[in-house]
Image: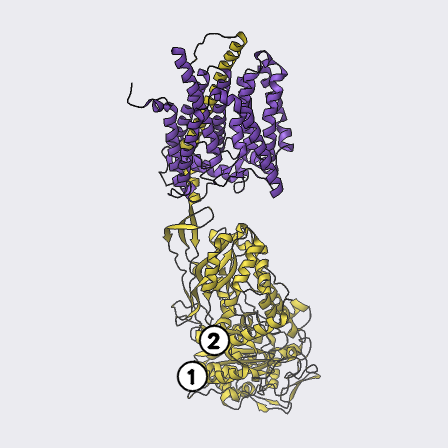
Amino acid sequence: MSIVPAPIARQPWQMLIPLFVLASFGAAVLFSAAGGNMQPFAQSHLIRFGIFLVMAVIITFFTRDAMKLLAYPIYLIILLLLVAVEAIGFVGGGSQRWLNLGFMTLQPSELMKPAIVLTLARFYDTLPVGMVGTWRALVPAGAIIALPMALVLLQPDLGTSLALAFGGVVVMFLAGLPMRWFVTSGIAGLAAIPVLYTFALQPYQQRRVTTFLDPESDPLGSGYHITQSKIAIGSGGLTGKGFNQGSQSHLNYLPEPQTDFVFATMAEEWGFIGGLLVIGIFALILRWGWKVASNSEDRFARLLAAGMVATIFFYVAINLMMVMGLAPVVGIPLPFMSHGGSSMLTNMICIGILMQVYHWNRRTHRRGLD
Amino acid sequence: MRRSRRPKQHISSTTLKDRFDRRSVVIGAFQGGIGVLLAARMGYIAIAENEKYELQSESNRVNLTLIPPRRGWLLDRNGAPLASNRADFRVDVIPERLADREDTVRTLGEILDFGPDQMADLNARIDEARPFQPVEVSTGVDYEQFAAISVRLPDLPGVVPQRGFSRFYPTGPSVGHLIGYVGPASAEEYEEDNNPLLITPGYKIGKDGLEKQFERQLRGEPGARRVEVTASGRIVRDLETRDDIQGDPVKLTIDGPLQDYAARRIGLESGSVVVMDCLTGDLLCMASMPSFDPNSFSAGIGSLEYSMLRDDVRVPLRNKVLSGLYPPGSTVKPMVGMAFLKAGLKPNESVFCGGGLRVGNRVFRCWNRRGHGRVDLAKGIYQSCDVYFYHFAQAIGMDPIATMARRYGMGQEFPLPVTTQFYGTVPDPEWKFNKFEREWQAFDTVNATIGQGYMLASPLQLAVMASRLATSEIVMPRLVLDGSTPKFESMGVSPEYKAYVRQAMSDVVNGPGTAGRARLPVEEVLMAGKTGTAQVVGLSLSDGKSGPWKFRDHGLFIFFAPFDKPRYAGAVVIEHGGGSGAAYPIARDVMTYLFDPQKGMDALLALEKQWGGTAQERLNKQYAAYAAEAGETVPPVPRREEDIFAQVEAEARLAVRQSESMADGVITPREDPFAPGDTQGRPTT
C-alpha cells in the first residue's frame, strides 16, 4: 500500500491532474487578459473552480438509486426555473437568461444541459428493453428535449439550445434507438436548414451565420470577432508572443478575451504549443470520460456518463471551432478556462457526475473481485 | 477504447450494450476527428498563415500617423515673415469615424461656443467632405476647450484634437490678396494627388495667391509618428517619431512694412498701390484694399464672412493690382509724349490750346475749357493739356502710340508667380476691326491719347510704365528675391529726352502742375508723377465727384522719386475716388513713408483716427456689425473655393467692360479733374 490515504488515492487522478493543469492555465490566461492582474478574472476563476470542485466531490457521494430518484424532480425544477426566467424577462422587457442569486447569476439553461442527460438516462433506464425500437422510446424523450429547447430558444439563445439538443440526441443515439431514425432525421434536418434559417432565426443570428460564411464581408461589424480572433491565434505562431505580451487582447482588439475568446487570448501568448496542450488536455479528460462510461455496469450509468462527455465535448468543440473561424459566433465559453460562473458550474457538474459514475464502477469492480 | 467482457444477463440488454459500445466508438472517433481537425486548423492559422496574421496584428497594434509638415515661411525682402506658423490647438473630425454625428457635432459646438452660423458651416463642411477626409472644426482653440474635448474623447470617436501649427499672417488683410491663404485640400485636389498627407488632419495647402504658387516649395516633408493604440484608438505609448521637415522659405521682394502701410493708407477707399524698385524691378508693395483676412479663411470661408465680403460693392475678394483694369486716363500722356519724340517731334514744338481742337467738323474739348494758351510737351504733361495731345496724335496716328504703349508695359503680361493677371487693352485700328468690325475713327485716337475709351491697364502695368519712364530701361517686375541683380535693356531714349520728361513730370508735383499737393514733405527728395482721372460714365450721368459711388471717376497717379535719380516708382489707383485728387495724396504718403517712415506714420495715424482704426480693426468691426445684423439668415457659400474665385474673376472681367461701353463715342474730359476733391474721411457710398 502507498502512503497516500485511501480516500485520496481512489480519486481519478488521471483526469483530475490534467483538469487542475487546465484550470490553472486558464487562470494564467485570465491573469493576462486582465492586463496582468488577478482581478477581476483570474482570482474569481480559481475560487469558483475550488468551490465547484468541492461540489463535484459531494456529487460523487450520491448513490445510483439517489440519482435515479432525483432525475425527474431535478429536471422539473430546472424547467420551472427556465419558465421563471422567461417570465421575468417578459415582465422586465427584452431577453433575460439568468436569475440573480445574490452571490452569482445563474443561467438555468446551463443547468439544464446535465439535467437533460440525467433525465434521458433515467428514462431509457426504465424503458423496457423491448420498446427501444418503438415510438415509446422516441416521443417522451423528444418531449424531454424539446420543452427546455423551446424555452431556451425563446430567450433567444441558439447556442445553448443546440447544446441541449446535442446532449439529448447523443444519449438517444447511445441508448440504441434504431439507426434509420437518426439517418432520416439527419437528412430532414439538413433539408430544413434553409427554412429554419429564414423563419426561425433572429436577424442578429442570421447575421452571425452569414458573417461566419464570409467574415471579411463585414470586417468592422459582426465579422470583426472572427477576424480578430483569427489574427490573435495566427499571430501567436508556434510559441506565442509570451506571457502577458498579447497585443490583441491587451489592446482590446479581441472581443471578450476572458470568456468566449479565451482560447484566442491563450493562443496569442502561448502559440500553437499552448493550443496543443489545451486540446490535448481536453482529449485526456474526454477519453477518461468515455472509459468511465464503457466501464459502467448498467445502462443508466453508461448513458449518464456518455451524455456528460458529450456535453463537455460540445462546449469545447463549438467554442474552438468558433474562435478558429470554423463555426459561427454562438456565445459558448470554453470549459475550465473561460471566466464565468454558469458554464463552470455546468462543466463541474458534468465532471462530478463522471467521477460519481467512476466511483460506482470502482465499487462494483471491488465487489466483483471480492 | 477498452471493452470489458461481462457475463451476459439478458439478450436484448446485451444487444443494447453492444450498440452502445459500437456507437460510442463512432462518437468517440467523431470527437477525435474533431480534435484532430481543430489541431490542424490551429496549426494552419498559427504556423502556415502566421506571417499574414502577424502583420495584421501589427497593423492593429501600431498606428502610423503623419505629422503635417510645418509650412515654409513667406518672408519679405528684409527677412520679416509675411506668413509664418503659430503653434496652436486644433480640432478635426473624420466623418466616417463618427459614431453619432449629430451628437458629436452638438457636443463640439457646445464646448467651442459655436454660433448657429458656425454650426451650419461645420455641418456643410462635413456634408461636403469625403468620409475619410478630415474636416476642420476649429483652430486656435484655447487650452481649456482643448482639454474639455480631450477628456471626452472616449465618447467622441472620430474627433481628433491635436497640437499643431496654423498659418499666421501677422499683417492680416494687408497681404490677403498678395499672399492668398491656406485651407484643407478639397476632394478634387485629393483625387488629383493621391498623397495621404492631403487627408491628414491639420494639413493645409495654398489656395490662392503666393501660397498656391509656391505650394511645392513651401510644403516640406511630413513627419511620422508610430504609436501603439487600443482598438478604440487610445494611444498607449509612442513607439517612434520622425520629425517633419519644414518647407523652404520663399523670400519676396515685398517690403512688409511698406505693404502694410500702403494697405492701411488706402483707408476707406477701394483701390491699389504698387511700388517698385525701378533699378531692379523688385515689387516692394502690391496692396489691394479692401481685402479679407487670410487668417480667418484657414478652415474654409465661413458663410457669414463670405456673404459680407460678397455684398460689399468694393469687392474685397478681388485683387485689384492684378485683376483690376482701369482706363489709365492722363497717366498715359508722358508715354504718348515719348511716342511723339520717337516720331521726330521736337519737345519745344507747340500748339495753341483755346479750350478745344477742331478736327474735321468736330470739336474735341480740353479739360480746361478756358484753354492753356501755347503748349509745348512739358506743359502738355504738367498741365495735362488734352489739346496738345489731340493735335499731335492726329498728326502721327494711332499705331506709333499703341506700339509705344506696349513698350511701356501696357497690354503686357509679366512673368510673375501669380494666379491671375489681367493684361488689359491697347487699342489700335487693327484691334478694333478684329473685335468690332468697325473702322478706327478720329475720336478713337483722341480717346486713346487721353487714356480713355478702349484703353485699359492694371495698376501693376501702370507701375511698370512709371519705372520705365523713370529709367528709360525695360524694367521687368519681379516678386521673388533670388540674390541676382537683373540687367535691363535700354529703351533707346536719348539722355536729353529722358531728362526732359523727368523734369516735366517733376513739374506736375513740384512745379506749376496738376498735383501740387503731392509734393513730398521730405528734404531734397522730389517726386515726379502724372495724374489721371478716368471717367466711367458720360458727363450727363454724373459730375464724377458725387452721386452714386459706381459713377464716380477713378483717380490715378503714377510716380517715381527722386525725379532726377529715380529709385522708386509706382502707381496708385483709387476706384471711383472722384478724380486723381483721391490718388496722389496716397502716393505722397507712401513715398514719404519710404524715405522718412516716422513722418509717413504720423500722417497715417492721424487719418486712421478719423477712419476708426486700422484696416484690420475696421474689418473686425464690420464683421461684427454684419454678423449682428444678418443673424441666422445667411446664404450658403459656394463650397468649392475654386468656384468663389472663378466667380470673382468673372465679375472682374465684367467690370472692366463698363468703361468700354462709353468708348463708342467722344469722351469729353471733365473740367478740373485734378482738383483735390478731399475724399479722405468722407463717407463714400
Task: Identify the chain drawn in purple.
Answer: A
Looking at the image, can residue A55 be seen?
yes
Q: What residue would you read off at disc 1?
A: B598
Quarter of image, res A281: top left
Looking at the image, can residue A333 be seen?
no
Which part of the image, by quadrant, shows the C terminus of chain A? top left
In the rendered image, the vertical position of residue A97 relative to residue A144, given as above or below? below
Q: CA distance from mark 1 to mark 2?
A: 14 Å
Q: Which mark is residue B582?
A: none
What amino acid is labelled 2 in the image? Answer: Asp
Q: What residue would you read off at disc 2?
A: B260
Of the residues under marks 1 and 2, which one precedes in the sequence? 2
The x and y percentages for residue A243 are 35, 38
The x and y percentages for residue B31 are 47, 22
The x and y percentages for residue A252 are 45, 44
Which chain is home to disc 1? Answer: B
In front here: B195 or B51?
Answer: B51
Please rate how many residues cluster around mark 2, counting C-alpha atoms within 10 Å: few if below 14, some from 14 to 19, many from 20. Answer: many
SS for callout 2: helix
Task: Identify the chain drawn in yellow.
Answer: B
Residue located at (37% from left, 30% from top) = A21
In front here: B617 or B325?
Answer: B617
